Image: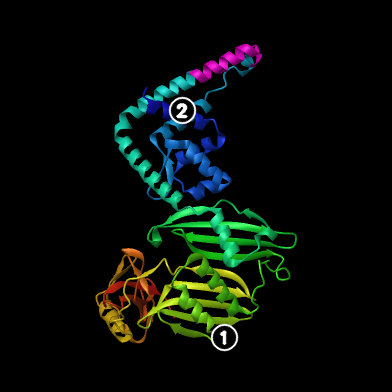
Amino acid sequence: MSGSEEETYSIMFSSLKHPARRKILRMLSDRSMTFSQMLEDLAIPSSHLTYHLENLGELVVKGDDGKYKLSSFGKASVTMMKGAEEVPDIHANRFSALPIRWKTFFVVFTIATLLFASMSIVQYASLNQLSSNFANLQKDYNRVKTENEQLLSWSNSANKAMAMLKDVVELDVSKYQASLIGSPTAELRNDLGGVVEEVTKYALVNSVSRLEVTLRYRNNEFSLFRLDQIEGSPNFPPIYKGAQPTNNIDAAKELLQRYQLATNKTYLQNMIALIASANSNTTEQILGNTKLMISNLDGRSEITLQYIASGVDFVGKTLKIAIQSHIVTEFHDDWSLYVIGSDHLNISREQAMQIAKNASKNYIWNAGETQVSDFTVLDSPVTAEFYPHTRPDDSVILYPYWYVTLHLDKIYPGGVNVIAVGVWADTGEVANIEALGRQT
């Protein structure tokens, strides 16, 4: 037997010792499952499930759809388990009457026989498929290894998260008992161009209050701080390292000043200047490519700073601060994540509407077995909403985009009375077209 085979069988038998890992194998023998589905069925902490999956080694593989399933060795292990579990209890009374040393001998002999037989079955079943499966297993292993290495390389330390709380938010964590809520999570966000997103949650507890803090990093860059006061609100506000401003605008300005000192991000300069010149009556103002918008309601302020070019608001490339009674409850920064693919607004609203009407003339949709192509688009109402959009080839590059809504003269098969058309505002090309139902 080769060293590789010995290692596989060693993993197989050591895995079968633990009841949780046996249960995972049984679950996966019935169907492929995601990590969260297994977590729900097993009712164990996510860190425990991760530990068990690592110990199952090559018995379990993760597919491209994110679901876990049994490898050929995993299937053989389940077969072996079933063989051991289904051994009939023959002559139980006679066996119970035997001396203890004979019982011990019998049990050891039976287990040895089962293991030997199972190893033979595994070898026989695997030999025919080993050569074809090895390449696939190696490919899956290399892919998972690469993803894990990437995730680990981006993994944000607790020290960095705590530094954000202490130096930027200025929470006095020494006045609380700080503990992690669950385990930090890290995942590849393919919908955001493959960035690695890490989320860490803390509980900050003292004798009079309990705070829950969420910190998110994307590609090792700060993305989100959120503060939830679970107990003690409103009479016991968070404890800070120093005196905090009693004005929401000043609180936002000082937060960004500390953030700039901690990160040295150049785009914060215009943001700080805009907030410094704002007052309680300010709702909107622009400096360079940065647009400041402020809304106030019942002691809560929402301060939004977003990228603007050629009169185009690039929603997404944004920094937001929410402040309730001078307490920062949320701080969100995805300015660095998104880039601008084009800021040329070459297609006007009226042109976008006409392009959408022309595109609808050749549009066909299916409603069950009915194909609908003969419909009437009304001249009005027609609406065109502008907002930047990402193109399919890159989910973090923003382009100017019109979303045009065309109303039909009646409700057509499928409940359709609206045609929606997406038009790229820089090129005039139709991005997408779809039939929508029962809009008023």
Q: Position of residue 250 (x, y in %)?
A: 59, 78
Total numbered badges shown on the rendered structure? 2
- Camera-side residue of 62 and 85: 62
Q: Which range of residues does the magenta coloring cover?
A: 96-112
Q: Residue at x 54, y 72 (%)?
A: 257
Considering the image in quadrants, where does the N terminus appear?
Answer: top left
Q: Is residue 264 above or below residue 73?
A: below
In the rendered view, does 331 fall on the left or right side of 346?
right
Q: Residues within 10 Å of mark 2 (few under 14, many from 20)?
A: few
Could you tell me if the residues under marks 2 and 1 are in contact, i.e. CB atoms within 8 Å?
A: no
Indicate the quadrant where residue 308 lies: bottom left
Say which residue label 1 marks. Answer: 279
Report if residue 413 is visible in the image: no
Closest to the observer: 136 or 156? 156
Q: Which residue is mark 2?
A: 10
Q: Secondary structure at mark 2?
A: helix
Sequence-wise, the earlier of marks 2 and 1 is 2
Real-space CA distance between mark 2 and mark 1, rounded to the nearest whole angstrom: 70 Å
Q: Is residue 104 highlighted in magenta?
A: yes
* Magenta part, dominant SS: helix
